[in-house]
Image (cartoon, rainbow, N blue to C red):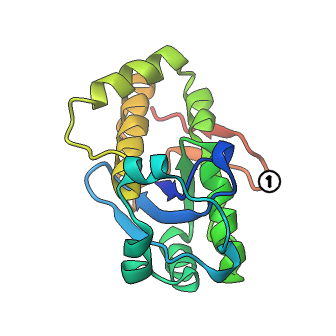
């Protein structure tokens, strides 16, 4: 199963009110990504928007109205792009925003969003190792607080964790998976390669 990372930008953080997804990005490697601006759905009318969030991601409501894609279109394209993939995020909120998007679209979840912690545990990595890698990624040319760029950065972090803890790079598309997945089981086991 191919690994894909995902990131959402939102109207605000939940601590500031009821938030909705405004952009989603996915990455299947640390070089390329795909992202969609999400037009606010009618069911989200009256949900919160903060100036702090807008200042962080730089996406205005006007831009979403003008350039955003309908939730149905975004959910359908995500379902195709994520079919057969294991999807990971670095925040539990990304799974909530995926659910919010699918619900507004009247569609099934395009994919279950796992958390980076699952990979960290499976690799036997530590929070210190994650923090060190994250600091090293600061010197790479990743944009910040845009969904596609954040998804690429997360993929690079996972790739580096893999390299350090299994001394093997992530497989390229079409090669054997890194982890063995058991349906219904939230844990992962690294595949041992001789």
Please, is residue 102 above or below residue 193 in the view?
A: below
For this view, does 190 lie left or right of residue 44?
Answer: left
Residue at the image point whose x is 36% and y is 32% from the top? 160
Q: Give whichever of 95, 56 is nearer the camera.
A: 56
Residue 175 point in image, percent of width and height: 40, 56
For this view, does 44 lie left or right of residue 64?
Answer: right
Residue 57 point in image, percent of width and height: 39, 52
How many residues crowd mark 1 within 10 Å: few (<14), some (14–19), many (20+)?
A: few
Residue at the image point whose x is 60% and y is 47% from the top? 13
Residue 78 point in image, percent of width and height: 52, 73
State the residue lying farthest toward the right: 184
| Number of marks in picture | 1
Please, is residue 186 above or below residue 135 in the view?
A: below
Splitting the image into 4 quarters, where does residue 48 fall?
bottom right
Splitting the image into 4 quarters, where does residue 191 fall?
top right
Please, is residue 111 above or below residue 189 in the view?
A: below
Q: Mark 1 points at which residue?
A: 184
Residue 163 point in image, percent of width and height: 37, 30
Splitting the image into 4 quarters, where does residue 188 fall?
top right
Residue at the image point whose x is 50% and y is 44% from the top? 178
Q: Give whichever of 80, 178 is nearer the camera.
A: 80
For this view, does 108 lie left or right of residue 85?
Answer: right
Do we see residue 3 in this rendering? no
State the residue lying farthest toward the top: 128
Do we see residue 147 in this rendering? yes
């Amino acid at each position: 199963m191919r690994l894909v990372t995902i990131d959402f930008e939102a109207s605000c953080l939940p601590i500031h009110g009821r938030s909705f997804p405004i952009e989603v990005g996915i990455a299947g490697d640390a070089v390329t990504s795909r992202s969609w601006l999400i037009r606010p759905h009618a069911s989200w009318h009256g949900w919160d928007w903060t100036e702090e969030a807008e200042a962080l991601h730089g996406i205005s409501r006007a831009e979403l109205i003008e350039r955003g894609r309908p939730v149905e279109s975004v959910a359908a394209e995500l379902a195709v792009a994520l079919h057969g993939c294991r999807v990971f995020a670095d925040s539990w909120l990304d799974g909530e925003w995926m659910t919010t998007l699918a619900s507004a679209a009247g569609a099934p979840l395009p994919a279950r969003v796992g958390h980076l912690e699952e990979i960290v545990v499976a690799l036997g990595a530590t929070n210190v190792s994650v923090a060190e890698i994250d600091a090293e990624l600061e010197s790479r040319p990743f944009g910040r607080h845009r969904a596609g760029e954040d998804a690429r950065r997360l993929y690079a972090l996972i790739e580096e964790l893999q390299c350090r803890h299994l001394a093997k790079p992530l497989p390229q598309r079409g090669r054997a998976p890194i982890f063995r997945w058991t349906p219904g089981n939230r844990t992962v086991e690294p595949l041992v390669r001789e």
